[in-house]
């Protein structure tokens, strides 16, 4: 048996993962012989890394709580089986909406071909293939962010003994934060390796406040659709709800954290304010309106049928907008529709569980069919 040293190492690691993959996907049994896996036709640098860069780099390039840097061959190699398993089981990339419901602006999903490529590569000894002359650049440098910020009144301390923490901290309005925003971003602080999620609330505290903006690991700045802005009344209070969880490599450490919320000032052509509504289970008339996003309830227990949101037209026609069967609080965000959903006069939304939040804009712009 002739094999390069590297292949042998990969093969040893492969055995354990292979069993799991074969059990998970019997179809693969025919495709690959468990004892003599064929070398994949895909190479890391040519075929796999571009895919990882597109779908995984926002979290897996060495910072943040994601454990693995997938942007370098030798770092990714030991994880090849795990990658195959995670993408087959739809655990990675993390994304809550069920396949086939809704069309979302920031969906983190792989298509079947991409999944097949990753699995084929992993099962086929995860070859490096021809390496580039120079290592490709990592994900782009941080975009220029405006300096208008909401900052914590005091930093959060996560003690050595705390494995998890959830805190609600008041924010201070920084220089340049006006009465409106076109969008938000979060800049993690020192505790970037353990910060799992953040929610910006406007009001008196996190429990009763209105959730304005959500952040999950790896998230880029989030802008409202064109023409739309968030109101930030001068007298409103702001609070940041922060969820931390340590991993094996951060257990026992103390952190002092002061993440910041970036506020993007709106341009004058943003004339339509967002309304953020808590909707009760059942049918709530909201039309005429344009629906921008849905945030699942905090602490959701989706149950067997899942958490569901539907649009009900004034003719009774039902359009599914979002369904979540597998819930994980870490990844609960404002799921924003790629094309905001227009609801005619008399149209409603129907929600399965209490505590869902919808963002909408009242009275859609008058189109040709709506002119008086
Ligand atoms: C939005 C952030 C994010 C994206 C995008 C993402 N991951 Fe992850 N990944 C994580 C986090 C966070 C963890 C740590 C486990 C956890 O907390 O869920 C993780 C864990 C993993 C693990 C280790 C699982 C284990 O065995 O412990 C693998 C492998 C992995 N991801 C592969 C991928 C691949 C492949 C992609 C792209 C197709 C991807 N991830 C995209 C955030 C992300």
Image (spheres, rainbow, N blue to C red):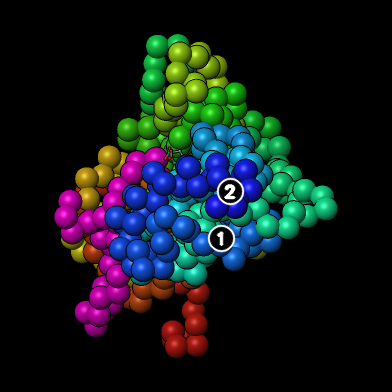
Q: Nearer the viewer, residue 194 or 132?
A: 132
| Magenta residues (range) | 303-331
Q: Which mark is residue 7?
A: 2
Please give the label number shown on residue 122: none
From this view, report whether residue 347 is shown above or below residue 110: below
Q: Quadrant of the C terminus?
A: bottom left
Frontmost residue, 339 versus 33? 33
Residue found 42% across the figure and 55% down from its top: 35
Residue 174 appears in view: yes
Mark drawn on residue 39 = 1
- Please tell me how many numbered marks the rendered image carries: 2
Residue 307 coordinates in the image, percent (x, y): 25, 56
Residue at 46% over, 47% down = 14
Q: Are marks 2 and 1 in contact (CB under 8 Å)?
A: yes
In-front residue for pair 346/150: 150
Residue at 26% from the left image edge and 55% from the top image edge = 325
Residue 224 included in the magenta stretch of the image: no
Question: Would you place residue 256 above or below residue 23 in this image?
Answer: above
Task: Give the residue displayed 65% in from the left and 53% down from the top.
Answer: 128
Q: Is residue 59 visible?
A: no
Q: In which quarter of the image is residue 298?
A: top left
């Amino acid at each position: 048996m002739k094999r390069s040293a590297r292949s042998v190492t990969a093969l040893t690691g492969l055995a354990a993962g292979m069993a799991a993959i074969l059990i998970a996907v019997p179809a693969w049994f025919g495709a690959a012989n468990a004892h003599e896996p064929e070398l994949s036709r895909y190479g890391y640098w040519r075929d796999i890394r571009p895919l990882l860069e597109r779908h995984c780099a926002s979290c897996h390039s060495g910072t943040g709580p994601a454990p693995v840097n997938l942007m370098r061959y030798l770092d990714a190699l030991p994880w090849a089986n795990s990658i195959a398993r995670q993408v087959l089981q739809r655990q990675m990339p993390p994304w809550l909406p069920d396949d086939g419901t809704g069309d979302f602006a920031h969906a983190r999903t792989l298509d079947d071909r991409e999944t097949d490529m990753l699995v084929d590569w992993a099962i086929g000894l995860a070859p490096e293939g021809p390496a580039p002359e120079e290592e490709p650049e990592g994900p782009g440098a941080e975009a220029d962010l405006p300096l208008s910020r909401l900052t914590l009144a005091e930093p959060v301390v996560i003690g050595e003994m705390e494995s998890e923490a959830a805190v609600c901290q008041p924010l201070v309005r920084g220089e340049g934060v006006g009465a409106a925003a076109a969008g938000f971003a979060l800049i993690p602080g020192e505790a970037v390796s353990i910060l799992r999620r953040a929610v910006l609330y406007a009001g008196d505290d996190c429990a009763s406040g209105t959730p304005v903006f959500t952040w999950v690991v790896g998230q880029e700045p989030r802008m409202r659709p064109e023409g739309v802005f968030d109101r930030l009344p001068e007298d409103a209070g702001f609070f940041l709800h922060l969820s931390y969880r340590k991993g094996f490599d951060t257990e026992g450490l103390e952190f002092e954290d002061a993440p910041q919320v970036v506020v993007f000032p709106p341009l004058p052509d943003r004339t339509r304010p967002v309304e953020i509504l808590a909707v009760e289970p059942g049918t709530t008339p909201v039309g005429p309106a344009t629906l921008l996003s849905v945030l699942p309830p905090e602490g959701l227990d989706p149950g067997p049928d899942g958490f569901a949101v539907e649009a009900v037209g004034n003719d009774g026609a039902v359009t599914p907008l979002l369904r979540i069967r597998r819930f994980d609080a870490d990844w609960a965000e404002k799921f924003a529709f790629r094309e905001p959903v227009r609801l005619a006069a008399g149209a409603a939304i129907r929600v399965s569980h209490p505590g869902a939040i919808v963002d909408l804009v009242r009275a859609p712009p008058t189109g040709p069919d709506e002119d008086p």
